[in-house]
Image: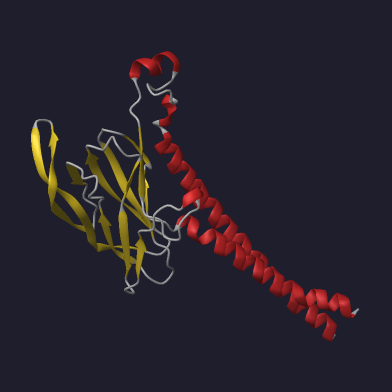
């Protein structure tokens, strides 16, 4: 009898631990500031957007600062207006000017700051840019982002990727760069000039869908964890009342 009661008493604790563990695992999956789409073509021009979810329940996101990689400056960066937000674009003088379309570019955008708006709890906002000409000698562009909340908390999305593919605690938004597909080869066999599958280009859409799917799964798991925890507590209270009776 005592053994059975002991097991019943442990159920609320187990339920609470389960809920906490699920929420701990689910939280980071939908909290990252990221680049959408996540892939662009080397040497080309692309429209990208920084997707900024609000990860707090008691504060709004009121500021986003994005720093561009000055080791790989872009000759063209233009901003699409976001209703309710003001934008400030900062440029830096280049040590080595860029040559593009017969013109010499001696300065490039180094930082963009959005202020004046709000991303409320449970919401996200996208901040679009048109960028180019993308470099051909690297496989990714890393942007460092600072997300400021109305309670003055600042989340620094600046951590580089870890070896082995392990995700950093606050990963920096990263745009993967893929080789330009050779059209003739793609028409014949669906292969790029370097032998890679020409289907690599649409990876951006796939990446976006995967992230959205991950977001949904994380939220569902979080809700399930809470329900399990509440059920465990209720069962424990009921068992205690029965034992008293």
Taking depth in this image into account, of 71 and 75 the one nearest to the observer is 71
Q: Is residue 237 above or below residue 192?
A: below
> What colour scheme governs how the chains and residues are painted in the rendered image of this protein?
secondary structure
Dividing the picture into quarters, in which one does residue 42 lie? top left
Nearer the observer, 207 or 191: 191
> Which residue sits at x=8%, y=35%?
103
Q: Quadrant of the N terminus?
A: bottom right
Residue lying at 71% horizontally and 74% vertically, measured from the top left: 12
Residue 206 screen position, x and y as percent: 45, 38
Q: Return the residue found at the far right.
A: 1
Query: Exactly how many numbered labels are in the figure?
Result: 0
Report if residue 85 is visible in the image: no
Question: Residue at coordinates 30% horizontally, 43% vertically from top-left?
Answer: 48
User: Closest to the observer: 178 or 30?
Assistant: 178
Please give left or right for residue 219 compared with residue 155 in the image: right
Residue 18 screen position, x and y as percent:
66, 66
Which of the image's four quarters has the C terminus? Answer: bottom right
Tell me the quarter of the picture where residue 230 sits: bottom right
Q: In the current view of this chain or complex, which residue is farthest to the top?
A: 188
Q: Position of residue 94 (x, y in %)?
A: 13, 48
Closest to the observer, 5 or 184: 184
Which residue is outermost to the bottom? 244
The answer to whether 99 is drawn above or below residue 62 in the figure is above
Q: Is residue 85 left or right of residue 141?
A: left
Q: Residue at x 45, y 61 (%)?
A: 169
Picture coordinates of residue 16, whole percent (x, y): 65, 71
In the depicted structure, whether residue 167 falls above or below residue 20: above
Q: Is residue 139 visible?
A: yes
């Amino acid at each position: 009898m005592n053994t059975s009661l002991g097991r019943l008493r442990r159920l609320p604790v187990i339920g609470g631990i389960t809920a906490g563990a699920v929420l701990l695992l689910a939280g980071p999956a939908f909290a990252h500031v990221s680049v959408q789409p996540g892939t662009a073509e080397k040497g080309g021009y692309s429209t990208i957007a920084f997707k900024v979810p609000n990860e707090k329940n008691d504060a709004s996101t009121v500021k986003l600062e994005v720093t561009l990689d000055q080791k790989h400056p872009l000759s063209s960066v233009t901003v699409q207006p976001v209703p309710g937000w003001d934008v400030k674009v900062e440029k830096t003088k280049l040590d080595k000017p860029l040559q593009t379309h017969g013109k010499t570019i001696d300065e490039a955008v180094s930082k963009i700051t959005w202020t004046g708006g709000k991303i409320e709890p449970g919401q996200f906002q996208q901040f679009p840019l048109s960028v180019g000409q993308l470099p051909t000698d690297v496989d990714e562009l890393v942007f460092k982002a600072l997300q400021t909340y109305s309670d003055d908390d600042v989340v620094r999305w600046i951590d580089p990727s870890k070896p082995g593919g392990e995700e950093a605690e606050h990963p920096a938004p990263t745009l993967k760069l893929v080789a330009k597909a050779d059209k003739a080869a793609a028409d014949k066999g669906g292969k790029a000039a370097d032998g890679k599958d020409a289907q690599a280009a649409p990876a951006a859409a796939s990446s976006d869908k995967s992230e959205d799917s991950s977001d949904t799964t994380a939220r569902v798991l979080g809700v399930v964890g809470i329900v399990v925890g509440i059920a465990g507590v209720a069962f424990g209270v009921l068992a205690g009342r029965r034992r008293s009776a």
